[in-house]
Image (cartoon, rainbow, N blue to C red):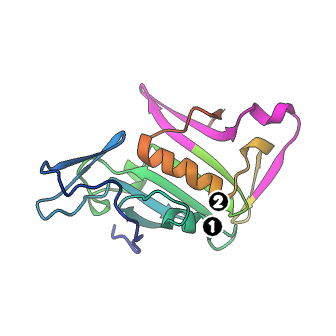
Amino acid sequence: MTPTASLDIAVLGDSRDRDSRWEGNQSHERMVDPGGRVIPTHALAVNGRTWMELQSIEKGEENDLTKLLSRLDGSKIYSLILWKLPDGKSIDQTSPKRDATEYMQCAGSADRMTVEVRRLKGKKFEHFVVGRAPNNGGNPEKRETIYWDSVETVVAPNEVFSSAEAAELFRSYYRTGWVPSSYVLRPLSI
C-alpha cells in the first residue's frame, strides 16, 4: 500500500547532536536511517481508506494533526485512526487491515466526535470509548448522538470531544501509546 498523502509535521526534539541510529522521543523511539531520515513510527488513516505515514508531531496548537481533525465534517471526512507501525517498517511494508490492531480512532465532525482506543492486553484485545472524568457527568441516563458517514453513534455527554480536545488525546497516544490517566475509559464489546 502506498501512502496517498503526507503530513508536513516537524520532528520533535533535536537529534543533531546524537550519533546513534535510535532517537528517543519520550516513551517511543524512532529509527533514523544512515542518511539521517527519520523512519516513521506511526500511520494515519482518513475514513479507513486513505493511509499515510506520520513523520512526527510537533508541540503547539497549529500542527497538521490538529488541522486534520478540525477538517472532520461528519460526511466527506468523518474518521481518523492513528496506529503504531511495526518497528522499523514503513507503511509500504505492512498491511493496515492485518497490522493495525492497536490504535486510537475518532469519528464525527470537528465540533462533535467520539474517540476510541484499542489495545492488546495479554492475548485479548480491549476496546474503549474515551471520556472526561467524572464518568458521564454523574447522569448515567443522559446520552448524546454523534453523526458520521450516515452512522449514528450514541455516547455519554463526557465522551463528546471537539477537534482541539481530540488532538490532545491523539498527541498523547502518539507519544505514550495510551490515554492520559485524567480520562476515563468505558469498555466496548466488539
Residue sitting at x 70%, y 39%: 132
| Position of the C terminus by quadrant | top right
Location of residue 78 in the rendering, given as x and y in whole percent from the top left corner: 64, 65
Marking on residue 163: 2
N-term-proximal mark, 1 vs 2: 1
Instruction: Please say if the residues under marks 1 and 2 sit with CB atoms less than 8 Å apart.
Output: yes
Instruction: Tell me which segment is drawn in magenta.
Output: 117-146
Q: Quadrant of the rendered structure where residue 110 is? A: bottom right
| Mark-to-mark CA distance, 1 and 2 | 5 Å
Taking depth in this image into account, of 38 and 125 the one nearest to the observer is 38
Location of residue 156 in the rendering, given as x and y in whole percent from the top left corner: 78, 42
Residue sitting at x 84%, y 31%: 138
Location of residue 74 in the rendering, given as x and y in whole percent from the top left corner: 70, 67
Amino acid type, residue under disc 1 in the picture: Ser
| Position of the N terminus by quadrant | bottom left
Residue sitting at x 64%, y 74%: 76
Taking depth in this image into account, of 28 and 50 the one nearest to the observer is 28
Label 2 sits on a secondary structure element that is helix
